[in-house]
Image (cartoon, rainbow, N blue to C red):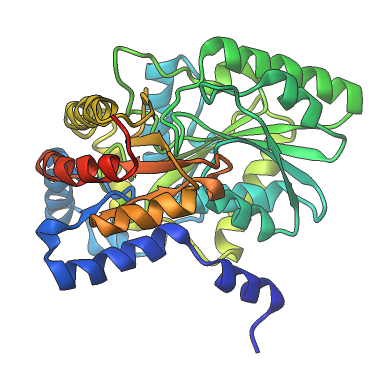
């Protein structure tokens, strides 16, 4: 018999993955061209050509035992130094290879740093809305999660944030640009969070770590500058993924950045390196490490997502839906005109697949992933129009 913990996970399942499977089944019945699946954040824009060029060059010039062999748990030293140099150039930071650990995507980075930091019963603070899997990641290490509120614009409510920090708070886990809201935290908000955390550390005599989950760092719009979170709090650890910035979700490549300024930095880096191994990741994919190191100044076609964002937002608003204009990532929140589960079910009548956001800590909305083709979004508008009429909108 399976463990009680896993039994609960199986029962809860993944709403997003379940909807994705349902979309496949619906496509077999009515044709893929008639299904409008907005459930999964799977990048649509092509991987930059420089990545394929890098792969070919590496295969032609590097020894295969290096490209396909084990690396140190932390990754290749030259790759880690390249990432450190790139961060320093872009953000004025002071990382070296010592501070960078290559990971099997951001999920690996998050689990490794939580494994490194958490004791059973300690608390991780999320700010609503948040990525649904965070709860499972915290549960992996028998810790507790606590939710802090957001304001009407989905920015952190700093008063509630401060009230939710306790002597048991070990980690604050944030995600900006945010999945699912697309909100980008402002410098003022991050400055306020940093000041609150510094005050609480002194009050409780504890170390509190701000873990910044940043797979959407490069995906921002309207000339917005995405603030560099470590500038606002010294105990900040970055979990990064190239899945979205280079359209490489299946390659599972990312990194941890742990600064020297963080409390117990050297011990944390050593422990995170061990966590990569004992959690079963061993090391990040060797060939892909080398390839991304040659593409650090590349990024996917953000303008394509921006076009999708503007089209989707304006047309849904015209139909009478209440939407939140995203500033980053590639998700849009739409308020449901009825009970969330009922609305998700009704949308299926018109072959529209949406994800309810109760599991993201934001009940009463659906998340629409617009990382799909512009043509698919345009083709979905008659279905959304029919849905709006069914809801008596407009």
Q: Is residue 169 left or right of residue 236?
A: right
Q: Residue at x 18, y 66 (%)?
A: 27
Q: Residue at x 36, y 61 (%)?
A: 19
Residue furthest right in the image: 204
Please state, as top left, top right, bottom left or bottom right, where the N terminus lies in the image: bottom right
Q: Is residue 103 left or right of residue 29?
A: right
Q: Residue at x 79, y 38 (%)?
A: 169
Residue furthest bottom in the image: 1
Please state, as top left, top right, bottom left or bottom right, where the C terminus lies in the image: top left
Q: Is residue 364 above or below residue 312?
A: below
Query: Where is residue 157, by image quadrant?
Result: top right
Nearer the observer, 276 or 48: 48
Q: Is residue 179 above or below residue 158?
A: below
Residue 105 visible from this viewpoint: no
Percent position (x, y) of residue 254?
A: 41, 45
Residue furthest front in the image: 392
């Amino acid at each position: 018999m399976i463990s009680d913990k896993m039994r609960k996970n199986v029962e809860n399942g993944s709403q997003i993955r379940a909807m994705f499977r349902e979309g496949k089944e619906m496509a077999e019945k009515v044709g893929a061209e008639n299904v409008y699946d907005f459930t999964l954040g799977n990048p649509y824009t092509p991987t930059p050509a420089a990545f394929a060029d890098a792969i070919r060059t590496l295969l032609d010039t590097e020894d295969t035992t290096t490209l396909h062999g084990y690396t140190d748990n932390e990754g290749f030293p030259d790759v880690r130094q390249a990432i450190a140099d790139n961060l320093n150039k872009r953000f004025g930071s002071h990382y070296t290879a010592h501070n960078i650990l290559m990971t099997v995507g951001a999920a690996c980075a998050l689990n490794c740093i939580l494994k490194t930091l958490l004791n059973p019963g300690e608390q991780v603070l999320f700010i609503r809305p948040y990525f649904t899997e965070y709860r499972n990641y915290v549960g992996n290490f028998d810790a507790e999660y606590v939710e802090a509120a957001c304001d009407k614009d989905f920015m952190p409510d700093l008063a509630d944030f401060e009230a939710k920090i306790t002597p048991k708070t070990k980690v604050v886990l944030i995600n900006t640009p945010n999945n699912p809201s697309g909100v980008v935290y402002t410098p003022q908000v991050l400055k306020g969070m940093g000041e609150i955390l510094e005050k609480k550390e002194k009050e409780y005599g504890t170390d509190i770590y701000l873990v910044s989950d940043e797979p959407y760092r490069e995906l921002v719009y309207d000339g917005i500058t995405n603030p560099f979170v470590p500038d606002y709090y010294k105990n900040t650890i970055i979990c990064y993924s190239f899945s979205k910035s280079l359209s490489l979700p299946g390659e599972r490549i990312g990194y941890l950045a742990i600064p020297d300024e963080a409390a117990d930095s050297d011990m944390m880096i050593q422990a995170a390196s061990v966590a990569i191994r004992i959690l079963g990741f061993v090391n990040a994919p060797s060939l892909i490490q080398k390839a991304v190191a040659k593409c650090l100044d590349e990024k996917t076609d953000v303008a394509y997502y921006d076009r999708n964002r503007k089209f989707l937002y304006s047309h849904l608003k015209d139909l009478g839906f209440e939407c939140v204009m995203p500033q980053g990532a590639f998700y849009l929140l739409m308020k449901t005109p009825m009970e969330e589960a009922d609305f998700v079910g009704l949308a299926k009548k018109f072959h529209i697949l949406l994800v309810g956001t109760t599991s993201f800590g934001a009940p009463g909305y659906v998340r629409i992933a617009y990382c799909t083709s512009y043509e698919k979004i345009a083709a979905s508008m008659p279905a959304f129009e029919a849905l709006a009429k069914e809801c008596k909108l407009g």
